[in-house]
Amino acid sequence: MREKEKMQKIEIDFENLKRASDAEKQQLKDARSSELGMLQSQLNEERITRMEKDMQLNEVKHALEDTQRKRDEAKRAMQEAMKQMHESEEKFHGMRNKISDAKLLMNQNEKLHHELNIETDHRKELITNWRT
């Protein structure tokens, strides 16, 4: 809005310039040039400020994207680690079950071996008794 008002003022000054004497015309021209120069400077400063803010915004966007990408990578790595941990736990339980089964088989084997020894001793005794 300010710029519009300033532009209107400049237009009014221009109208007055037409009516004024040469000296006044020169003063008005100088004032107008000065105001235009100031307006141009302000406009350039605003453009530079806007460009700087845009650059900062882009930097923040890139940082946010990098953070999001790293977060996603960390999430995938965590999921993969949990999957591997679950698989390892399943293997561990499977090995534990196999060890328990092996212990049972060994106990049964020892029991059968003991019974076989008893039976062998008993048959030897029968054979010895039969011969005598």
Image (tube, rainbow, N blue to C red):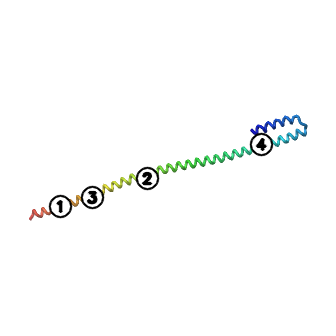
| Mark 3 or 1: the one toward you | 3
Left or right: where does residue 94 sit relative to residue 115? Answer: right
Q: Label 4 neighbourhood size at 10 Å, few (<14), some (14-19), many (20+)?
A: few
Q: Quadrant of residue 100?
A: bottom left
In the figure, is residue 119 to the left or right of 35? left
- Local SS, label 3: helix
Q: Tell me where residue 8 appears, x and y as whole percent.
A: 79, 36
Q: Secondary structure at mark 1?
A: helix
The residue that appears at 54% across and 49% down in the rendered structure is: 71
Residue under the point 80% across and 41% down = 36
Which amino acid, by three-letter code, is at mark 3? Asn
- Tell me whether the residue at label 3 lies in contact with that at label 2, contact meaning CB atoms closer than 8 angstroms: no
Q: Earlier in the sequence, mark 3 or mark 4?
A: 4
Name the spot of residue 123 as percent of width and height, x first. 15, 61
What quarter of the picture does the N terminus occupy?
A: top right
How far apart, in angstroms, are the residues tagged by discs 2 and 1?
51 Å
Earlier residue among tags 4 and 1: 4
Task: Tell me how far mark 4 sits from mark 1, CA to CA.
Answer: 117 Å
Say which amino acid is labelled 1. Thr
Q: Are marks 3 and 1 in contact (CB under 8 Å)?
A: no
* In the rendered image, the vertical position of residue 6 relative to residue 121, given as above or below: above
Q: Residues within 10 Å of mark 3 (few under 14, many from 20)?
A: few
Disc marking residue 40? 4
Residue 130, percent across and down? Answer: 10, 62
As drawn, the label of residue 85 is 2
Q: Secondary structure at mark 2?
A: helix
Say which amino acid is labelled 2: Met
Q: Which residue is mark 1?
A: 120
Residue where numbered disc 3 is placed = 107
Q: Nearer the observer, disc 4 or disc 1?
A: 4
